[in-house]
């Protein structure tokens, strides 16, 4: 009979045997899969696992601190947190093409992770294993015909890690579906914060800032996004929705505040239902929720004076705007 408890027990034993006295590294994204994989492997080999979490400058507000608090302070992982935001944002300056933005972030991530891996290898006398949170649907997807979103956009989280060190893979979730992964996470006492999190793309807010990504725009979107997530959660809708987020448009329009004329950015709200991200339906959020989100954003985020609602399904729209 499959239970999370049995799965954890047998997986932990198997990983321990496989790794022996070797050392493993893991790239944490803050998402469900890599987090559960890391906690599971940590259970097996503890200090022989080093996790690396990179701030790419386009994370959500407070995400860099939150992940450290959760993974290091609460769950006891051996975690290296690298704040590389300046390096990423410098590379993104002046770039407007969506695919180029993705490639820059993907390549920069690999470069940062590779540096860390070599540094860890020096400290530990060598790294032999790479832990990845690959799930069964990922295995299927990459071995069969690529889905529409994969051929249209390059998803850098699939198979994009450095090969220079010739690391052997540990993929403890390879036979599992998402709901099973969540059950395992719960059994491992991981917080709902991590387990119930909506998917967040590897290139982060960069694919939700149309046109050039600047520090100013990132800060604006972080604030708007934080309001969207908070209000969706307050309305009790967060877990029923595949993704709900804000998009920053590089379009300025005229507004009025007090007796002042404003000229500021537009923010789009997007909320979709989906099974697997391949197709999606826009969610008719209650007007009351939209109203609160809109008035909070225009009142609290200096730099955004207009909020619009995206009512496009996929296809023909994609979930992310870039
Ligand atoms: P689209 O925008 O293609 O997105 O309809 C489908 C799903 O994939 C996520 N997504 C990404 N995830 N790296 C990721 O890790 C990416 O580059 C990327 N692009 C899109 C998106 O959030 C949605 O869930």
Image (tube, grey):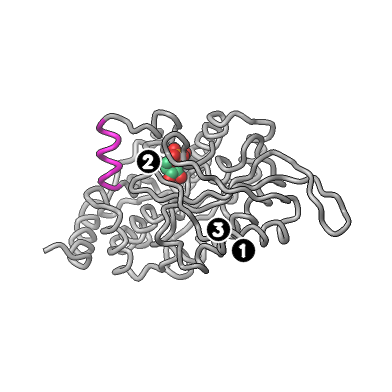
Ranked by sequence position, the earlier of labels 2 and 1 is: 2
Q: Which label number is shown at residue 63?
A: 3
Name the residue tied to disc 1. Answer: 292
Mark 3 lies on a secondary structure that is helix
Q: CA distance from mark 2 to mark 3?
A: 27 Å
Ranked by sequence position, the earlier of labels 3 and 1 is: 3
Q: Residues within 10 Å of mark 3 (few under 14, many from 20)?
A: few
Residue nearest the viewer, comparing 24 with 230: 230
The rendered magenta stretch, by its main secondary structure, is classed as: helix
Mark 2 lies on a secondary structure that is loop
In this picture, residue 233 sits left or right of residue 149: right
Residue nearest the viewer, comparing 77 with 259: 259
314 shown above or below 67: above
Residue name at image x 75 percent, y 50 percent:
303
Q: CA distance from mark 3 to mark 1?
A: 23 Å
Q: Which label number is shown at residue 279?
A: 2
Is residue 44 at all visible to an observer of this figure?
Answer: yes
In this picture, residue 90 sits left or right of residue 100: right
Q: Nearer the viewer, mark 3 or mark 1?
A: 1
Q: Quadrant of residue 230?
A: bottom right
Start-end of magenta stretch: 135-144
Q: Nearer the viewer, mark 2 or mark 3?
A: 2
Ranked by sequence position, the earlier of labels 2 and 3 is: 3
């Amino acid at each position: 009979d499959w239970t999370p408890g049995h799965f954890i027990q047998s997986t932990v034993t198997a990983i321990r045997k496989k790794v022996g006295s070797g050392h493993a590294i893991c790239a944490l994204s803050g998402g469900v899969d890599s987090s559960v994989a890391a906690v599971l492997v940590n259970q097996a080999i503890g200090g022989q696992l080093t996790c690396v979490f990179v701030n790419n400058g386009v994370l959500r507000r407070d995400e860099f601190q939150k992940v450290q608090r959760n993974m290091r302070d609460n769950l006891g992982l051996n975690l290296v947190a690298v704040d590389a935001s300046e390096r990423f944002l410098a590379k993104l300056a002046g770039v407007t093409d969506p695919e180029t933005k993705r490639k820059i972030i993907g390549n920069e991530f690999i470069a940062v992770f590779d540096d860390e891996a070599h540094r860890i290898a020096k400290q530990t006398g060598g790294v032999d294993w790479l832990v990845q949170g690959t799930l069964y649907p990922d295995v299927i997807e990459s071995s069969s015909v690529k889905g529409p979103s994969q051929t249209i956009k390059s998803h850098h989280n699939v198979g994009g890690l450095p090969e220079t060190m010739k690391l052997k893979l540990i993929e403890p979730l390879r036979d599992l579906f998402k709901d099973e992964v969540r059950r395992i996470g719960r059994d491992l006492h991981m917080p709902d914060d991590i387990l119930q999190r909506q998917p967040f793309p590897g290139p982060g807010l960069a694919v939700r800032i149309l046109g050039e990504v600047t520090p100013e725009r990132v800060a604006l979107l972080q604030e708007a996004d934080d309001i969207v997530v908070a209000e969706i959660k307050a309305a009790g809708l967060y877990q029923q929705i595949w993704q709900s987020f804000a998009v920053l448009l590089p379009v300025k329009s005229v507004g009025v505040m007090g007796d002042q004329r404003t000229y500021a950015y537009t923010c789009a709200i997007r909320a979709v239902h989906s099974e697997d991200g391949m197709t999606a339906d826009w969610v008719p959020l209650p007007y009351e929720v939209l109203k609160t989100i809109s008035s909070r954003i225009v009142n609290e985020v200096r730099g955004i004076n207009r909020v619009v609602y995206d009512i496009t399904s996929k296809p023909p729209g994609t979930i992310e705007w870039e």
